[in-house]
Image (tube, grey):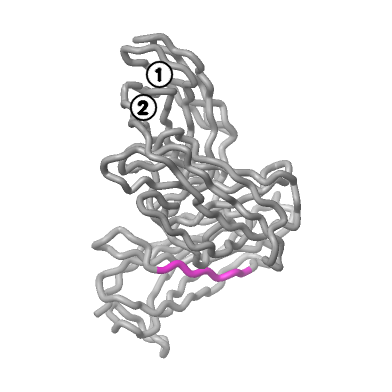
Amino acid sequence: MKKIFLCAFLILILFPVSSGFSQKSDTLSTLSVALTSDSPFVYKDNEGYTVVVGNVENKNEKTSVNSVQLRVNFYDETGTEPLETIRGGTILEVIPENGNSPYMIKSNSPNPNITQVSVMLEGFLPSPSKSQKLVLESTDISFGNNLQLSGFLTNGASPITDTFVYLALYDAFEPPRLVGVSAVPLGEVSADEKINFNFNEEIDPRAKSYQIFAQSNVFYSNWVDGEIPQQLTKLVTISNVSLNDSQGIKLSEIKVGSTVNIQSNVWVQFSAEQKSNETPYTYYAQVKNSEIPTVEFLGKFDGRFIDGGSQSVSIDWIPEHDGIYFIETFVWDRNSVPIADKGPIILLVVN
C-alpha cells in the first residue's frame, strides 16, 4: 500500500493545506535532503493552535542523515511579516538512505489570525545508519470513535533506549497525505525483549489508512500498514462525471494545450435530524498520469448546498503533456472532511 513511508502529491499549488490556509512559496535547495513534493497539511487543533505536518526525504543512496532542521513561518492574510517562526526537526532522529520521515510543528499560540504558512528546510548532517532490528506486529485493532490498536515490539540482540512506536494517519487522496502522527514511549528495552504497546486515538475524519513504525537510539523497525473503515455517513453522491471541450462536446481524446472541462453532478440528501440544510463544500478534480503515478493537476470549486437536490460543478484543465490520464473527483466539507465517496474514474488520452 505504501512501499515507501511517504509519497509525492502536489507542490505549492491549489490544495497544499487544509481549507482555510494557504502556503507561501519558500524555495528549497539542498543536495540530498528535501521536503517531499506533497505540500504540508495544516489544520487548527481543538485548542486553536495551528499544526503543520509533512515529510522530509533523504535522497542519498549511501548515507543516512540526522539533525534535520526545519523552519516554519506562520502568517496572517497579508503574508508580509511572520506572526511566529518555529524551528523543529523530524520525528525520526535518523532518516535512512532513500528514506523518509514525517515532521509535526505547532504554533506557539492559538492565534486565529494565522491563515498562511511556509516551511523551509534549513540544514541536516550525515549520520551513521541505524539497523532495522526492531520487529513490530499488530495483534488487535478496533474502530469506533477511537482507533484502538495493540501489538508487540521485539528488540534485537542489544539493549536499547529512547524507544517510541508511532502511529501515522493518512487521508484518502492518491498518493495519500499525512494528516497526523501520535507516539507511544517505551523507553528502555532489553536485548531480545518483547514488549507490548497500545494506541487509543480519536479517529480524524480525514483519515482513511494508518501506518505504525518504531525507532530507538540505535534501531528502527519494519512498517505495518492498515485501512480505516469508513466512519462517516455520506451526504453527497458524485455522478455523471464527464470530460467536455469548450463547446460542451464530450471527449475521450484531446490535444496538448486544449481546454478540458471536468464536469460532475453532485447530489445531496439531508437527514431529518439535521439542524441546518446549508452545507458549504469543496469539489476537487485530480488528474493523474496513468503510466507514471504522479499528480498532473488538482483543481477545486467551492460551492454551497442550501436545500437537497443536485448541482452541476465543473473545473477547467489545460494538459501540458501527452499521455493517458485518469481523473478522480472528490467532495469535502470546509473542514477537509470527505462528505462523498470518490466519483467514477474517467480516462482521457492527450496527444
Pointer 1 and pointer 2: residues touching (CB < 8 Å)?
A: yes
Q: Which residue is mark 1?
A: 153
In terms of depth relative to the viewer, which is nearer, 204 or 215? 215
Residue 301 inside the magenta-drawn segment? yes
* Residue 69 placement (x, y as % from top left): 52, 44
Q: Is residue 333 magenta?
A: no
- Mark 2 lies on a secondary structure that is strand
Of the image marks 1 and 2, the number of the one nearer the N terminus: 1
Query: Within 10 Å of the Cα at label 1, are there few (<14), some (14-19), or many (20+) other Cα atoms?
Result: many
Q: Residue at x 59, y 51 (%)?
A: 72
Q: Nearer the viewer, residue 114 or 287?
A: 114
Please indicate, yes or no, whether residue 312 appears anywhere in the rendered image.
Answer: yes
Residue 1 seen anywhere in this rendered image of the structure? no
Q: Position of residue 350 (x, y in %)?
A: 27, 77
Q: Nearer the viewer, residue 243 or 220?
A: 220
Report the front residue among 32 and 91. 32
Answer left or right for 128 relative to 161.
left
Residue kind at label 1, given as amino acid type: Leu
Q: CA distance from mark 1 to mark 2?
A: 9 Å
Q: Is residue 8 left or right of residue 283?
A: left
Element under disc 1: strand
Residue placed under numbered mark 2 in the picture: 221
Name the amino acid type tagged 2: Ser
When the figure is inspected, residue 226 is found, relative to residue 340, above or below; the finding is above
| Number of numbered labels in the structure image | 2
The stretch in magenta equals 297-303
Residue at x-position 54% and y-position 53%? 338
Question: Position of 288 compared to 18: left or right?
Answer: left
* Residue 271 point in image, percent of width and height: 65, 53
SS majority, magenta = strand
Kindly give the residue lying farthest to the bottom in the view shown. Answer: 247
